[in-house]
Image (cartoon, rainbow, N blue to C red):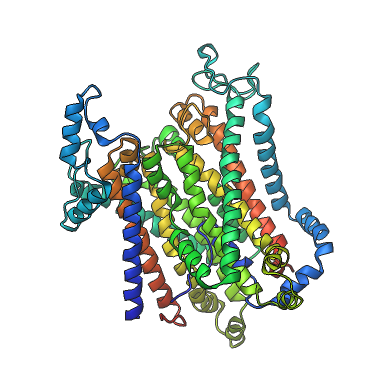
């Protein structure tokens, strides 16, 4: 049976560059010995990688705006004011202008960012935890647990998320619930897949055998000795998956399958402004550019993290 | 190989069966039933009951499912609730349009992505490489609906060169095909570049160079063939994602394909149509993965099917 090439639709080579060679316990040992200095050198390497720095700044800004922004805005995101419709950015009282029915763009944008944060980070966090646990159990205990978990992983992993989301929208009605459910249902398998592979290759490493020999229990070996070693690849993958979730949420909302108006998801905002693009382009360009910046930032951050955290790529 | 194909075939059937049950049941969970879509909102309860009776909606879901499967097996695909068009007719017209768009985009992403990736690897760390890498990062960071809007804005709104939506002349195909191909091109390019770089660092490449083979032969023929392996192995996955993205791209450009039809039928609660076309797309994805696995063994003779 052929092994499918490791990788994922978003960033296929990311995984390949990440996987530590099977049985290469030396790399893992080196990693553990130099841990005290690794945090400092990681920061040092981040500073030398300008693209990754830009990426992390963009991602950080996005998170901060989404967290704090909605509580600072003076307007209700759904409040229409036809007398103040289609004001261009930098108008008095409306920093980013207003849309075709006079809703304040800035207020809508920050709520839109919060929605995509909730979907992007929230769902990715849950699928990371579930996927890591499932992958660790499958890789460490092998046997029937592995057979079942691997079977489910293979069924779901790589399945077109958008198709699942549309089918779920048919069942639950279009909305954020169907979108988030679809993203979670598919993406945990991506995490489970890498974690299983990494644990499978690390469980026979000498330091694990040593721990076992001195009587450390399975749970402790998994938590203290194995999981820290799979943290790097899962973090890299997580930043790609947050970007993916943000794009999918916006795309589905754009075609009417995700968040429903008047909820100002970035995709909804782009869709509502598209018919007025020739007259007042800012209604679409502001949310559109925001999505691109967030996705670009997270992708650059992922690329940077991969270069920084993967020992094999260090020169 | 034969035994392997049989086993994969059986597994594919099991997946399809499970998927069909999941799709069938989940659409039956949907709030409201088809009588709410088709009949006048003021229709009497007796009329509704008669309508459900006619569609067999009053039977248990498991019975409905078996009836549906046996109808499918006999080639009776049902009709659209909204328009009354037989689903078989929808399949031929919409399916053809989707195939045209999908294959154009799929071919485009490989025809551009592979040569660009090889070029970037061969000219590593030159402006060519940096330009290709920047293009790749941008191509993957750009959501397809946003790219679509920008292209429509430029080529339809400002320049009036191409129509913003519709079907079915070549000029209608240009923008949707570019948008659908964009992400795949970027991914293929990046993958091809990394795979080529890995191959160019191998001992056999040094041997070929040392014995005086021309650089073009080393890069274009020897390293290239080996670098193709990961590309081919992931093509099934890429095809799956392409199918997912057609749902968005076809909807944006009102390209009358299966993706457009599926999104439309879900929004209009045309369940027989939604059900059939979701299942069809699931089947295509599963089948594409099987084909990719077979192609994987074909490009890499070291792989044995056991």
Q: Looking at the picture, how far across and down is residue B290, in whole percent? A: 37, 68
Is B275 on the left or on the right of A310, as rendered?
A: left
Q: Is residue B75 above or below residue B28?
A: below
Is A52 on the left or on the right of B280, as rendered?
A: right
Which of the 4 image quadrants contains residue A73? Answer: top right
Image quarter in which the C terminus of chain A is found: bottom right
For the point 72% across and 60% down, the residue is A308
Q: Looking at the picture, how far across and down is residue B251, in whole percent? A: 37, 40
Q: Is residue B239 above or below residue B9?
A: above
Q: Residue furthest top?
A: A83
Could one spot residue B260 in this view of the protein?
Answer: no
Residue nearest the observer in this picture, A206 or A56? A206
Q: Residue furthest bottom?
A: B211
Could one spot residue B27 in this view of the protein?
Answer: yes
Q: Looking at the picture, how far across and down is residue A47, in whole percent? A: 78, 53
Is B167 on the left or on the right of A73, as rendered?
A: left
Q: Looking at the picture, how far across and down is residue B50, in whole percent? A: 16, 33
């Amino acid at each position: 049976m052929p092994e499918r090439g490791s990788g994922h639709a978003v960033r296929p080579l990311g995984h390949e560059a990440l996987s530590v060679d099977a049985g290469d316990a030396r790399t893992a040992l080196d990693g553990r010995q130099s841990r005290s200095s690794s945090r400092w050198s990681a920061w040092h390497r981040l500073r030398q990688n300008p693209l990754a720095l830009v990426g992390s700044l963009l991602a950080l800004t996005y998170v901060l705006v989404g967290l704090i922004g909605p509580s600072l805005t003076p307007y209700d995101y759904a409040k229409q004011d036809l007398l103040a419709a289609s004001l261009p950015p930098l108008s008095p009282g409306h920093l980013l202008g207003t849309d075709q029915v006079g809703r304040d763009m800035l207020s809508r944008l920050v709520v839109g960012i919060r929605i995509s944060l909730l979907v992007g980070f929230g769902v990715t966090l849950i699928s990371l935890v579930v996927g890591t646990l499932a992958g660790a159990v499958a890789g460490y205990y092998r046997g029937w647990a592995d057979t079942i978990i691997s079977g489910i992983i293979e069924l779901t992993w790589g399945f077109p998320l958008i198709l699942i989301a549309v089918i779920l929208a048919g069942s639950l009605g279009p909305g954020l619930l169907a979108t988030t459910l679809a993203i979670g249902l598919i993406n945990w398998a991506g995490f489970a897949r890498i974690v299983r592979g990494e644990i499978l290759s690390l469980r026979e490493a000498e330091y694990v055998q040593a721990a076992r020999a001195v009587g450390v229990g399975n749970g402790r070996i998994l938590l203290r000795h194995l999981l820290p070693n799979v943290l790097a690849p899962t973090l890299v993958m997580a930043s790609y998956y947050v970007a993916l979730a943000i794009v999918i949420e916006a795309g589905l909302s754009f075609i009417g399958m995700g968040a429903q108006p008047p909820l100002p998801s970035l995709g909804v905002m782009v869709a509502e402004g598209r018919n007025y693009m020739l007259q007042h382009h800012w209604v679409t360009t502001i949310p559109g550019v925001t999505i691109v910046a967030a996705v670009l930032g997270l992708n650059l951050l992922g690329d940077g993290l991969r270069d920084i955290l993967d020992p094999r790529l260090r020169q | 190989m034969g035994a392997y194909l049989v086993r994969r075939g059986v597994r594919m059937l099991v997946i399809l069966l499970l998927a069909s049950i999941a799709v069938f049941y989940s659409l039956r969970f949907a709030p409201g039933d088809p009588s709410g879509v088709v009949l006048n909102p003021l229709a009497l309860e007796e009329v509704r009951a008669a309508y459900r009776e006619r569609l067999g909606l009053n039977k248990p879901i498991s019975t409905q499912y078996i009836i549906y499967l046996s109808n499918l097996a006999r080639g009776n695909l049902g009709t659209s609730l909204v328009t009354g068009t037989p689903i078989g007719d929808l399949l031929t017209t919409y399916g053809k349009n989707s195939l045209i768009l999908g294959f154009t985009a799929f071919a485009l992403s490989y025809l551009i992505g592979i040569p660009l990736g090889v070029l970037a690897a061969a000219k590593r760390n030159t402006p060519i490489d940096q330009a290709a890498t920047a293009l790749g990062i941008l191509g993957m960071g750009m959501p397809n609906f946003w790219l679509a809007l920008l292209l429509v804005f430029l080529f339809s709104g400002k320049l009036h060169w191409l129509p913003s939506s519709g079907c079915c002349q070549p000029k209608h195909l240009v923008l949707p095909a570019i948008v659908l191909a964009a992400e795949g091109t970027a991914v293929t390019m990046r993958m091809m570049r990394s795979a080529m770089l890995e191959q160019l660092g191998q001992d056999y490449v040094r041997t070929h160079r040392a014995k005086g083979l021309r650089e073009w032969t080393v890069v274009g023929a020897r390293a290239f063939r080996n670098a193709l392996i990961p590309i081919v192995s992931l093509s099934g996955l890429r095809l799956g994602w392409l199918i997912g993205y057609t749902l968005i791209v076809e909807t944006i450009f009102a390209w009358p394909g299966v993706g457009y039809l599926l999104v439309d039928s879900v929004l209009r609660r045309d369940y027989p149509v939604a059900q059939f076309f979701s299942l069809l797309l699931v089947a295509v994805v599963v089948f594409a993965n099987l084909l990719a696995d077979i192609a994987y063994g074909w490009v890499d003779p070291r792989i044995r099917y056991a």
